[in-house]
Amino acid sequence: MDEEHERKWRCKGCGRLLGIVEHDRLEIRFARGHQYRVTLPVTCVCRNPQCNTLNELAVGQPDQTLEVNAGN
């Protein structure tokens, strides 16, 4: 992924990392090596059993759950 343009998408309820956004695609990784790249818009429920918050993300959507990678 292009580190300059990637952003972390976090749950709006608990802050858990949901995926990495680059342009109009979202990269999702699970345990056991499962990895997916999907196009936006996307909706998911947080996997944290104490949270279960519904999260939504669309192309160009200003979202407080995104943080820009500082390249570290």
Image (cartoon, rainbow, N blue to C red):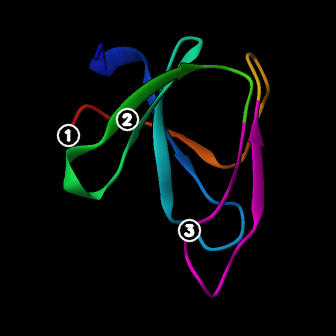
Residue 3: give its label: none
Q: Quadrant of the N terminus?
A: top left
The segment highlighted magenta reads: 43-57
Query: x, y percentage for residue 72?
Result: 20, 40
Which label lies toward us, 3 or 2?
3
Q: Is residue 67 above or below residue 17?
A: above
- Magenta-drawn stretch contains 51: yes
Q: CB atoms at circles 1 and 2 under 8 Å apart? A: yes
Instruction: In this rendered view, identify the residue nearer to me: 44 or 22.
Output: 44
25 sits to left or right of 59: left
The residue depicted at 20 percent of the width and 46 percent of the height is: 33
Task: Classify residue 20 by image quadrant.
Answer: top left
Q: Is residue 14 above or below residue 34?
A: below
The amino acid pointed to by label 1 is Asn
Mark 3 vs mark 2, CA separation in Å: 23 Å
How crowded pointer 2 is (Cα within 10 Å; few <14, some 14-19, many 20+) is rated as: few
> SS of the residue at dot 3?
loop
The amino acid pointed to by label 2 is Asn
The amino acid pointed to by label 3 is Arg
Instruction: In this rendered view, identify the residue nearer to me: 35 or 57.
Output: 35
Q: CB atoms at circles 1 and 3 under 8 Å apart? A: no
- Magenta-drawn stretch contains 70: no
Query: x, y percentage for residue 48?
Result: 55, 76
Which label lies toward us, 1 or 3?
3
The residue tagged 2 is 69
The residue tagged 1 is 72
Instruction: In this rendered view, identify the residue nearer to me: 63 or 17.
Output: 17
Mark 1 vs mark 3, CA separation in Å: 26 Å
Query: Mark 1 or 3 closer to N-term?
Result: 3
34 sits to left or right of 33: right
Query: Mark 3 or 2 closer to N-term?
Result: 3
The residue tagged 3 is 47
